[in-house]
Amino acid sequence: DKFARSIMSAPRARLVADVLETEAAAIMTVAGDDRLLTAVDAAAELIATSRDTLIVAGVGKSGHVARKLVASFASLGKRSAFLHPAEASHGDLGMIGEESVLLVLSNSGETRELSDLLAFAEMNGNPVIGLTASATSTLGRASRIVLAHGRHREACRNGLAPTTSTTLAIAIGDALAVAVSDIIGFRPEDFHRFHP
């Protein structure tokens, strides 16, 4: 009955609140990280001054976040494209322009599928911005600029499913896109052109 459902939902309501509080606390922590904020500013300058398409890459949940960020960058005035790292090794590396900047997402920074993409970027002089938990990871070491947000407790019951880490990647990516938009002087009328 209705009363029984309300009693059963109380613990679940606490669980839901805990998820939101965990993710919000992680965002507030990185918002106060001067090192990260300085890196985001440097990355925004690099992206804004590139005359080529921004390439955003990631695998798994990071790939889903990367696709969202591509849409945000495009919406805010920076031409961008998603590149799946596994497909990159099978010809899609041709998407990368001579002056393209690569924004590569991987929470662990150890995703094997990124190896060919990172090798290609190094060989061709394309700067990599790594969005990852650890600056000392493989991705972090391969990046010109590292947006390292640190390790935070995932919000799922087991602390395993990408929850807090994906929220951080989206939030940092959004901050980066907005900063790029500010640098390039994207105006309300420009926004309207892309959102008829």
Image (cartoon, grey):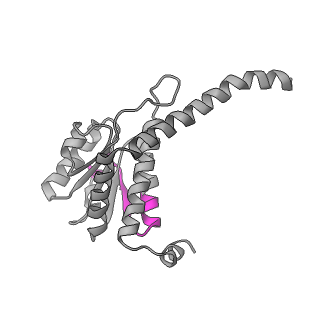
Is residue 80 highlighted in magenta?
yes
Q: Measured from the top left, where is residue 26 in percent x and y?
A: 45, 38
Q: Measured from the top left, where is residue 68 in percent x and y?
A: 46, 53
Q: Residue at x 27, y 35 (%)?
A: 110
For the image, the number of numbered tags is: 0
Q: Measured from the top left, where is residue 118 in percent x and y?
A: 21, 48
In the depicted structure, whether residue 93 falls above or below residue 142 = below
In the picture, which quadrant includes the C terminus?
bottom right
In the picture, which quadrant includes the N terminus?
top right
Q: Would you say residue 162 is visible in this rendering?
A: yes
Q: Would you say residue 78 is visible in this rendering?
A: no
Left or right: 137 in relation to 33: left
Pick the front one: 14 or 119: 14
In the depicted structure, whether residue 167 falls above or below residue 43 = above
Pick the front one: 125 or 35: 35
Q: Which residues are magenta?
A: 70-90
Pick the front one: 80 or 158: 158
Q: Measured from the top left, where is residue 154 in percent x and y?
A: 46, 30
Left or right: 54 in relation to 6: left
Is residue 5 highlighted in magenta?
no
Q: Residue at x 27, y 71 (%)?
A: 51
Residue 93: image quadrant is bottom left
Q: Residue at x 36, y 72 (%)?
A: 184
